[in-house]
Amino acid sequence: MINLTSRAAQQVRAMQAGQGGKRLRVLVENGGCSGFQYGMTFDDAKPGDAEFESEGVLIVVDGASLERLDGATIDFDDGLHGKGFEVRNPRAQSTCGCGKSFN
């Protein structure tokens, strides 16, 4: 399962307006400075996706990404030095300085 903080959910809902009911897709891709990087987009559910709801936001994740993201929490920081969306992933062994990639 993937959880959103209330700040992240509020930002997702604001961005989701006009997306035609698409869900938040959270994914892991090869790349970044640490081997894998996080990605988010709006998409329809596909066969084999896991589906969750957190803070009223519908989330879809493919099986391979879920193996690396299960138990993660997504936050949003828009403060003076805010990073935007930040994934707190208990499965990550290490992360890079920007917080966007991990291994």
Image (cartoon, rainbow, N blue to C red):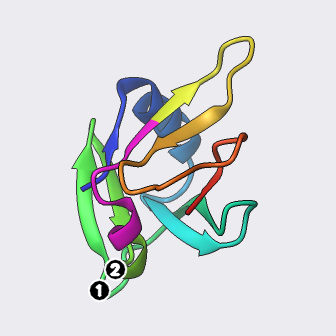
Secondary structure of the residue carrying tag 2 is helix
- The amino acid marked with disc number 1 is Gly
Q: Measure how far apart labels 1 and 2 are at the Cα level.
A: 7 Å
* Span of residues in magenta: 66-74
Residue at figure coordinates x 37%, y 83% from the top left: 46
Question: What is the x, y in percent for residue 29?
Answer: 60, 73
Quadrant position of residue 64: bottom left
Q: Magenta stretch: residue 69 in it?
A: yes
Secondary structure of the residue carrying tag 1 is loop
Please determine whether, in this image, residue 63 is positioned above or below residue 69.
Answer: below
Residue at figure coordinates x 24%, y 57% from the top left: 52
Instruction: Quickly name the residue at label 1.
Output: 48
* Label 1: how many Cα within 10 Å (few below 14, some 14–19, many 20+): few
Nearer the observer, 97 or 73: 97
Q: Could you say which disc has been placed on residue 63 in the image?
A: 2
Q: Are marks 1 and 2 in contact (CB under 8 Å)?
A: yes
Question: What is the x, y in percent for residue 12?
Answer: 49, 40
Horizontal relation, residue 95 to residue 65: left or right:
right
Looking at the image, the residue that sits furthest to the front is: 93
Q: Quadrant of the C terminus?
A: bottom right
Which circle, 1 or 2, is nearer the viewer?
2
Q: Could you say which disc has been placed on residue 10 in the image?
A: none
Please determine whether, in this image, residue 73 is positioned above or below residue 82.
Answer: below
Horizontal relation, residue 25 to residue 90: left or right:
right
Looking at the image, the residue that sits furthest to the top is: 80
Residue at figure coordinates x 44%, y 24% from the top left: 7
Q: Quadrant of the N terminus?
A: bottom left
